Amino acid sequence: MIDANSRRDFLQTAAGLTVALSAAPGAIAAPPADSFSGDLEWRNKQPGMHYRRLGRTGLMISEVVSGGDPISSTNYEHLNLALEMGLNYLDMAPAYGNGDCEIAYGKFLGGSAKRDKVFLQTKVSAYGGVRNRLYQQLFETLPGEKQSAIMARVDEIKRTNLAEKPGYYLTYFPGQHNQFAGSYLSSAMRADYGSQVETRPALRQCIIDSLEGSLKRVGTDHFDLLMCPHGVNTADEMDNPVIYETFSELKKQGKVRFLGLTSHNDPAAALRKAVALGHYDAVQMAYNVINAGYVDQAILEASAKNIGMIAMKTAHAVATHHKSLQPVPQWRIDKVNRVIPGDMKPPLKAYLWVLQNPHISAVNSNLWDETFVRENLALAGQKVEIQPA
């Protein structure tokens, strides 16, 4: 429970968001000390690493966690160094390398040899695509006048949607913007046709099949977090009882422990919907020095409800390995250099900037090799004075 003083601090902080948060997350009041009364769970605690509680889960996770993008069957052995340095959280998804990322993590874990040293997170990558496909198939059976009315709604959603506002929306990977189209159509149809789609057995089966495949590839009997949906584009994608009902069944079977979601597009709306629904334990969302002004208020609201938060696409705001997205706009690099002056590389500054926010449990980091491991994990516990943007 939040006491009167904490609530006062929360409201005062929220009132100053426009002035302070986009430049100085370290100015945000820390979560109330009495906001969690459960047991803390530690794994692989090592000197030199710093750990934070992942919201209501009680999991004490390393401030820097391993993202799944760079991990493959031919590129994973450098994670042994990360483990030695105290990393204890591995992020993965079936979509990464068509399952190869999960296979690689399975090789790294060596069956069960290192399983008790790490928390494992995977995602239901297929959920959004299955849902959109069901709506699309239904759309194609409708008469022309109804299709026209739906497409008019799509145009209105697109016109009024904050998610595509420059500065809030950033392209982190090729093809990212294409994800909006199917989600907009589903959103436009949901009010009139949701009863024909949202309860379809295919959605429940999608979640089950995805998890079973992930368990087999990794060679584990359970995941600590299951993220569904993977990549929320519109908040109503989360608003389906089938997700939580299926998760609850899998939890009773001992295959998952906590429910989360991820969002690249419109992370603030995803956070607010997670708060409203009440059953999401954690959110992994795009959060960085560029989009922060749009997301900070939602972070405060989610933190007040003890939802754990991991920032992703943090360095992608100022650097990218995707050649088609290079070069990153110079103004973004200039901004991170203003808020954290000095000779440090811009991606490292971007991680460090987010870690000054006490409401964020960790940053999801691409650990391509031992150099990235040493540089990125060394950021844990560092405190800096954020300068005006």
Image: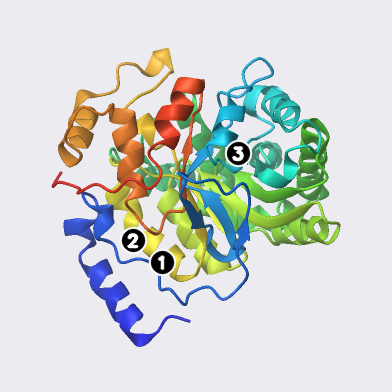
* Gap in angstroms between the C-alphas marked 2 and 3: 26 Å
Quick one: SS at disc 2?
Answer: helix
Report the amino acid beneath label 1: Glu
The answer to whether residue 188 is seen in the rendering is no
Q: Is residue 208 above or below residue 21?
A: above
Of the pair 179 and 265, the residue shown nearer to us: 265
Circle 2 residue: 297
According to the picture, the residue beneath numbered tag 1 turns out to be 301
- Residue 117: x, y in percent? 67, 44
Lateral position of residue 5 relative to residue 285, left or right: left
Q: Quadrant of the C terminus?
A: top left
The residue mark sitting in front, 1 or 3, is 3
Q: Which residue: 23% across, 28% down?
A: 333
In the rendered structure, find residue 91 and report the number of the disc placed on it: 3
Which residue is at 65% across, 29% downward?
Answer: 95
| Measured Cα–Cα span from mark 1 to mark 3 | 24 Å
Q: Are marks 2 and 1 in contact (CB under 8 Å)?
A: yes
